[in-house]
Image: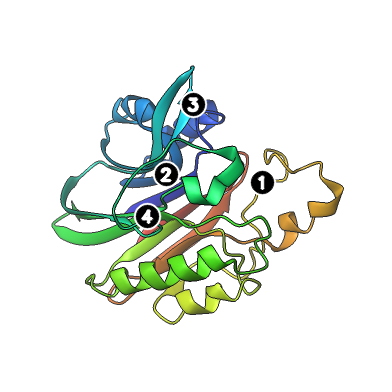
Amino acid sequence: MKLITINAEGEKHLDRILPFIERENPDVVCLQEIFRTHLPRFESLGYTTTFLPMVRKILNGVHTDFGVVICSRHKVSDVRSIHFHDTSGEIHNFDTEHKVLAVNNPSLIVTVTCDGKEYRIGTTHFTWTPDGRISSESQVRDMDTLLTLLKEERPHIMCGDFNIPRNINPLYSRLTEYYTDAIPPTYTSSLDKNLHRLSTDTERQYMFTSFMVDYIFTQPPYSASDVHLKFGISDHAGVIATIE
């Protein structure tokens, strides 16, 4: 089964993302930072969509649900929605003054039946922090909650934007206690220097050489092969893999 995960950054890169998906023709696409109102554009490519909001952001002057989605060309069942920042699931309007508090970070997990085989697939947008090299209190608390909830799950693949740079933020080791990181070590950053909003910030250039933050994590019996990153799609690279 072919899987792609991309942080879409809202509507900014859809004119690149949609043709990319059409060319690659994956079985499943996991997107983070996507507006609910844009889902019909992915459905027009032949996907069914399962969406989970994390905040409401302004789009065309209106507060609009913004979150994560799993797009599938195959049957989807057994949907599980998790909000780990506030387990009540309450969704707020975005507040730039309290960015972390306003976003109720989610994890969405579904079963996809492809060629007679069931694949348990999840996507998440983990808690953001101003300096990804340091675990914030919110990240530590949310990681504890998320892992506790995910331990209840049967084996699965978990992908998305984790905001946790590999081998830099200490929380990365928490994840690899439970998952195998499928991203080849030759990739050292998943942030796109040409499309990211901080690309010209001279003090943040280290991010484009050392911030691997987008992952595909696996658990047995699943494995990922032919894993590679595609830049020039969004402010984060698209991650492409074959899941077996």
Image coords of residue 227 (percent x, y):
49, 61
Q: Give the residue type at disc 1.
A: Asp
In primary-sequence order, the first of circles 3 and 1 is: 3
Reading the image, the residue beneath label 1 is 192
Tag in front: 3 or 1:
3
- The CA distance from mark 1 to mark 4 is 20 Å
Image coords of residue 201 (percent x, y):
81, 45
Judging from the image, what secondary structure is the residue with disc 4 in?
strand
Q: Give the residue type at disc 4.
A: Thr
Image coords of residue 86 (percent x, y):
36, 56
- Mark 3–mark 1 CB contact (< 8 Å): no
Judging from the image, what secondary structure is the residue with disc 3 in?
strand
In primary-sequence order, the first of circles 3 and 4 is: 3
Tag 1: Cα neighbours inside 10 Å, few (<14), some, or many (≥20)?
many
The residue lying at 65 percent from left, 61 percent from top is 132
Reading the image, the residue beneath label 3 is 58
- The CA distance from mark 3 to mark 4 is 23 Å
- Mark 2–mark 4 CB contact (< 8 Å): yes
Reading the image, the residue beneath label 2 is 31
- Mark 2–mark 1 CB contact (< 8 Å): no
Task: Say which of 60 and 179 sits in front.
Answer: 60
Tag 2: Cα neighbours inside 10 Å, few (<14), some, or many (≥20)?
many
- The CA distance from mark 2 to mark 1 is 16 Å
Reading the image, the residue beneath label 4 is 123
